[in-house]
Image: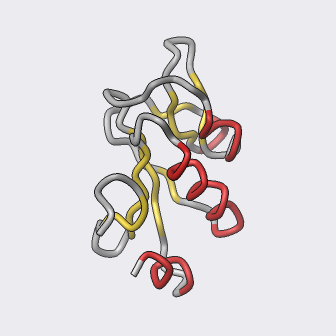
Amino acid sequence: MQQEAASAGEALEVWIDQDLCTGDGICAQYAPEVFELDIDGLAYVKGAGEELLQAPGATVPVPLPLLTDVVDSVRECPGECIHVRRVADRVEVYGPDAE
C-alpha cells in the first residue's frame, strides 16, 4: 500500500512531531529543502520562502522529486517523529503510524 500511494502520484504532506524529535538532523541531511534544525535543536518542516513552520502539526507538501529523500528521512529518523500522509484522506503512508 505504501508504494501505491507514491506511484499513483497522489498529493502527500509531511509533518514532524517535535515531542519525539531527537535533534539528530538526519532529515535535514537527506532533504534540506524540506527539513531544517532550529536553534532549539529540533527539526521542523520548511514552508514557502524557507520559513520554519513551528506550529505543532504544521505540514508542507512533499514535492514529488524529493519523495525518495523524504521517505529515507522517515526510515532513518531515530526519533520516529516524521509523518507522511496523503492529503486526500489524511492516511499516513510513511512513518510510525503507517499502515
- Expressed as whole percent of the image width and height from the top left, the position of residue 10 reads 48, 79
Point 55% across, 45% down: residue: 76
Point 50% across, 79% down: residue: 3
Q: Which residue reaches farthest top? A: 39
Q: Quadrant of the C terminus?
A: bottom left
- Expressed as whole percent of the image width and height from the top left, the position of residue 32 reads 70, 40
In the figure, 74 relative to 32: above or below? below
Point 50% across, 50% down: residue: 74
Image quadrant assignment for residue 69: bottom right
Of 27 and 52, which appears nearest the observer?
Answer: 27
Of 3 and 38, which appears nearest the observer?
Answer: 3
- Expressed as whole percent of the image width and height from the top left, the position of residue 25 reads 60, 29
In the figure, 7 relative to 75: above or below? below
Q: Quadrant of the N terminus?
A: bottom left
- Relative placement, left or right, of 81 versus 45 is left
Of 89 and 5, which appears nearest the observer?
Answer: 5
- How many marks the image carries: the answer is 0
Snapshot colouring: secondary structure
Point 46% across, 79% down: residue: 5
In the figure, 8 relative to 35: above or below? below
Image quadrant assignment for residue 65: bottom right
